[in-house]
Image: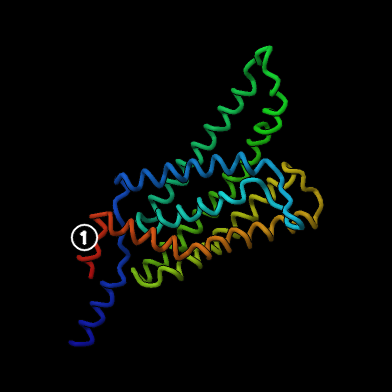
Amino acid sequence: MGASNAASVSSRSSKAVFAAAGSPYFSTVLALMGAVVILSNIGAAKGVALGPIITDGGFFLFPLAYILGDVISEVYGFKAARRSILVTFGLAIFAVLCFWVMIALPSAEFYDGQQALERTLGPVWQIVLASILGFLMGQLANAWVLVKLKERFGERGLIGRLIGSSGVGEFLDTLIFCSIAASVIGITDGAQFLNYLLVGFVYKTGVEIIFVPVTAAVIRWFKRKEPGYGQQVSTSA
């Protein structure tokens, strides 16, 4: 009987708990993710060389989108993460349509920035395509792995599942994104592409790992602030 009770308690303590996605906290994180992805898509149209390192102008923003994705997946679950990904890229597509209209509008006689505008925002649709395929697959893989690990270990092992899910998600994301975006920013040489790919993967994954303590702290804050989450944890314990 004692062993049976212990097994029952262990089973309940490892139950995956998620908050309802209808809270204002969820909508705030979703809005931030949309803004980060749109800005990173614009920045990614610029090729950047930092010494021997080749990257793009959105390199410092994109890891933040994954950190926000981790928060949503861990606190609100896979369905909420999937919805946030689709909404975010709907916003990204809307932004591209707006850029297209801005470029197509006839310029005033006093405006001399048309060529610069076209050069800056014109290739963004290709970057968005790369983001849709890369970030979509990467984020879904990241969310799926994180949630599956949570279903296995419950509230335990947060740091491990953040690192593990990030590695899987960032690899798929970077591979797909770089394959499409490289030619847009002027990378045609095989060695430069390999540099771009490896630097992107190592950098993005490294940043996420460095910020894992911050991500974990933010996640714990959300868990404390979400009343429904705390109630579910108490019930399952």
Which residue is farthest bottom? 2
Residue in the foreground of this view, choosing between 50 and 5: 50
Above or below, 94 relative to 202: above
- Quarter of the image where one finds residue 104: top right
Q: How many marks?
A: 1
Residue 3 vertical position relative to residue 195 in the rendered view, above or below: below
Q: Residues within 10 Å of mark 1 (few under 14, many from 20)?
A: few
Choose top left, top right, bottom left or bottom right for residue 45: top right
85 with respect to 42 (left or right)? left
Residue at coordinates 69% horizontally, 57% vertically from top-left? Answer: 197
Seen at 72% across and 25% down, the residue is 115
Identify the amino acid type marked 1: Gln
Height in image: 42 above or below 204? Answer: above
Q: Quadrant of the N terminus?
A: bottom left
Residue 44 placement (x, y as % from top left): 64, 44
State the scheme by which the image is colored: rainbow
Spot occupied by residue 5 in the image (x, y as percentages of width and height): 20, 82
Left or right: 57 as drawn, with respect to 77: right
Q: Quadrant of residue 161?
A: bottom left
Secondary structure under badge 1? helix
Q: Quadrant of the C terminus?
A: bottom left
x, y percent for residue 167 = 55, 64
On screen, 188 above or below 216?
A: above
Q: Is residue 186 left or right of residue 79?
A: right
Using the image as rendered, state which of residue 83 and residue 194 is in the foreground: 194
Residue 176 image point, x, y percent: 64, 52
Residue sitting at the far left: 1
Q: Which residue is mark 1?
A: 231
